[in-house]
Amino acid sequence: MIRIQKADFNIEDEILALRKPFKNTGAVVTFLGAARDISRGKEIKGMEFEHYAGMAEKALAAIREKALADYDILDVAIIHRVGKIEITENIVLIIVASQHRKDAFKACEFCIDELKKTTPIWKKEMAVDGDVWVEEHP
């Protein structure tokens, strides 16, 4: 399951929805990206995310499919928010369900790394001294 949305998400609800079809889930690994107030030494007031509609969803679907093919996992969910995000709010959630933890951890890390590299989603940070579109993907 992949989604790009403006609204926040409920982590527990998303985990339960991903696990529900599988009675053999032994591990669930999550990555939660949240908006922080300091970036590159500057005070951040908020963020805004934009995406290339259609292409961003295709990129996330490709990441999900590759994770399912390359790792011994049951399912993957990737949710990314767009629009204005306040400091401390959720930005991105990746959930991986598997029978065993090792592949779940590896797949989760793969998904966030690939998302940062390949998905056409852009971040603007609203800093105290001006707005900046972030180009690098740490």
Image (cartoon, rainbow, N blue to C red):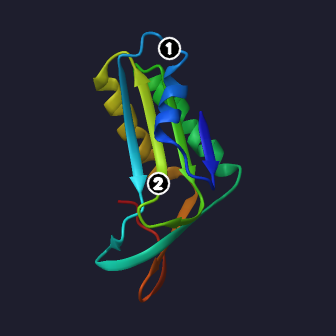
In which quadrant of the rendered view does residue 34 lie?
bottom left
Residue in the picture at 57% in, 37% down: 62
Q: Residues within 10 Å of mark 1 (few under 14, many from 20)?
A: few
Provide residue 21's location: percent of width, then percent of height. Answer: 55, 16
Q: 61 or 129, which is in the foreground? A: 129
Left or right placement of residue 20 versus residue 96 in this view: right
Pick the front one: 63 or 105: 105
What residue sits right under mark 1 in the picture?
Answer: 22
> How far apart are the two marked residues, 2 and 1, measured between alpha carbons?
26 Å
Q: What residue type is labelled 2?
A: Asn
Q: Where is residue 47 in the image (x, y as percent from the top left)?
A: 50, 70
Q: Which residue occupies 52% across, 65% down?
A: 85
Q: Which of marks 2 and 1 is nearer the N terminus?
A: 1
Q: In which quarter of the image is the N terminus?
A: top right
Residue extending farthest bottom: 129
The residue wearing badge 2 is 90
Label 2 Cα crowd, 10 Å radius (few <14 / some 14-19 / many 20+)? many
Provide residue 129's location: percent of width, then percent of height: 42, 89
The label shown at residue 107 is none
Kindly identify the residue that appears in the image at 44 percent across and 77 percent down.
45
